[in-house]
Amino acid sequence: PHALGEKSFAVLETARGMSGEFTAADIAAAMNLSAQSVNGSLTALQKKGLIVRGEPVKVEEDGKAKFVKFITVTDEGKSTDYFAEAAK
């Protein structure tokens, strides 16, 4: 079982609903939170094997180069039903 806090669960649910390449900042924007506020949850989810943060990739945004880590929800993260586990 993967005991998750309410915020981590919400972050996972948001990530599960996203498509294509996305970052912590994308998840935070979708949740109306700061990227820093979702990073702790992402770290917890990664430790449980539910998401993977990719290697830093250089992207250009507004003419400026920066490095981002794209996030992938693992098969386990996609298939785990936390509501069912929480009800046990």
Image (cartoon, rainbow, N blue to C red):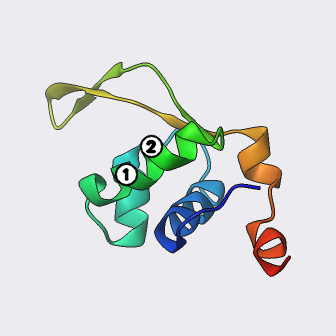
Per the image, the residue denoted by label 1 is: 40
Q: Nearer the viewer, residue 64 or 55?
A: 55
> Is 19 on the left-hand or right-hand side of 29?
right
Seen at 83% across and 53% down, the residue is: 79
Q: Secondary structure at mark 2?
A: helix
59 above or below 39? above
Q: Nearer the viewer, residue 49 or 88?
A: 88
Amino acid type for the residue under numbered disc 2: Thr
Residue found farthest to the bottom: 87
How packed mark 1 is, by other alpha carbons closer than 10 Å (few <14, some 14-19, many 20 or more), is: few
Which quadrant would the N terminus be assigned to in this image?
Answer: bottom right
Q: Secondary structure at mark 1?
A: helix
Would you identify the image quadrant in which residue 49 lies?
Answer: top right
Q: Nearer the viewer, residue 47 or 11?
A: 47
Seen at 29% across and 60% down, the residue is: 37
Whole-percent x, y for residue 11 in the image: 51, 61
Which quadrant would the C terminus be assigned to in this image?
Answer: bottom right
Per the image, the residue denoted by label 2 is: 43
How packed mark 2 is, by other alpha carbons closer than 10 Å (few <14, some 14-19, many 20 or more), is: some
Whole-percent x, y for residue 5 in the image: 53, 68
Whole-percent x, y for residue 36 in the image: 25, 53
Contact between labelled residues 1 and 2, with CB atoms less than 8 Å apart = yes
